[in-house]
Amino acid sequence: MQSTFRNCAGLGLASVLSVMVAMGQNAAQTAAPSQDHHFDVSTKSPWVDTGLDLVSGEVLQIKATGTACTAQTVPSSATNTLPLPSAPAGALLARLHSQGAVPLQVDSSKEIKIEEPGHLSLGVNGTNCAGSFAVDVHIVPPGEITVAAPAKDLRSKLGTAAQIWLQGQFGNPSAPASVNASPAISEGSGAPISVTPTTKNADSFSVPSVPLDDQLRKQIDTLPRRVNDEFNNLGDMVNFVVVGTQEKVQAALAAGNWFVADTDNNQAAVNAVMQTIAKKDYLQMPMSKLMLFGRYQDYGYEQAEPIAMVASRHHFRLWKAAFTFNGQPVWVGAGTHDIGFERDQRNGKVTHKIDPAVDGERQNIADSFHKSGKAKSMTYYLPPSPVQDARNATGGGYHSDGRILVVFLN
């Protein structure tokens, strides 16, 4: 997969570097006006009403100092009557909704993402002893992201990324070892390899195994197994299919924290600067164009942390298929995870290196659809002649169990 930096080559060196510096300066700042609040919470009052109404998408960052009581000072008979019996007596609690809502234990610090509107109250788990907490609450508005790393560290990271990009652009023969290409992986050299099942995080969605409708299965069987670049070099594998209207697909991806990649390099520079002026993070850097069905992708989506997306991002390309299922459009996707840099074996320049265990990105896509709440069902399907051991268009090797994720939207 071609590098984001290579895609920005048309902007000119000064433009690219100025955008990168602007992004670094922006990420070192708090993204929104002051949202800091201070409260004193004691056992004298069961709950302190902060007066803060909560909005979906906000993030609460709570820090507390002080103490109210210890377990030794609370009679054992009183523990069952605590507001939160599972938490230690004297712990700081946060309640996000009405009086009947179950509170959350805060301890000395806690970050809470608000999933639905509410109202913040603070309290102590028990009122049988004296004491208090000094509590600071910082609210990060929806869509805003703060980066804890100091500006100096961010500038250093951006400088390193820019240096790697320059070495690739001007053919520096002494490129760092970190950008050397991975060893070539022999494609189609024998029997299908045995692939370890996808490693999932503890909170990953377990995709059920459900038989596909015969009509849809036959249509998926006709799909190309891999995309290609403009020179007809075969590349990333097709690893997911989505059934649903364009509006439903876009809504599900937005809810899953995916951003549409910019398609125009010049406009990308303008967007990056405008986002910086607005004290927001630029998360829509262009990606290279690849082909399926004889045409470039209809959409490119990416998911990443600010600044880190210079070298690391989840992303996929999406094409609308020529067939439908039950009257619904069918979308075909190829997703990979950029994890660093390596040498493009086509031209010797620097490109993004993908995680060779591409099934991990397929799982990430499944997780994001599940968390969006807009997927009716999902399943895996193993097509004929599955891709299990291959190289992408730039020469980087990857492996898979060959299955395709099939997502049906509500």
Image: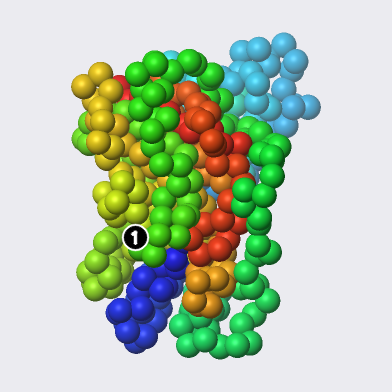
Which residue shows up at 40% across the image and 60% down it?
232
Q: Return the x and y of residue 383 as percentages of the image width and height.
A: 50, 30
**Above or below for 113 versus 315:** above
Front residue of this view, candidates 199 and 40: 199
Whether residue 66 appears in this view of the structure is yes
In the foreground, 100 or 377: 377
* 273 vs 341, nearest the viewer: 341
Can you tell which quarter of the image residue 53 is in? Answer: top left
Residue 37 versus residue 51 in the image, above or below: below
Whether residue 357 can be seen here: no
Q: Locate residue 343: give its quadrant.
A: bottom right
Query: Residue 113: horizontal and vertical position, in percent?
Result: 44, 39
Residue found 36% across the figure and 39% down from its top: 332
Q: Quadrant of the C terminus?
A: top left
Q: Look at the picture and state if 345 lies above or below 396.
A: below
In front of the other: 94 or 233: 233
Counting the numbered discs, the total is 1
On the image, the x and y values in percent for residue 71 come to: 74, 27
Q: Position of residue 213 (x, y in %)?
A: 39, 16
Residue at (30% x, 79% y) in the render:
10
Q: Is residue 57 left or right of residue 172?
A: left
Residue picked out by circle 1 = 289
Query: Which three-letter amino acid code belongs to the residue tagged 1?
Result: Lys
Element type where label 1 sits in the image? loop
Q: Is residue 333 left or right of residue 295?
A: right
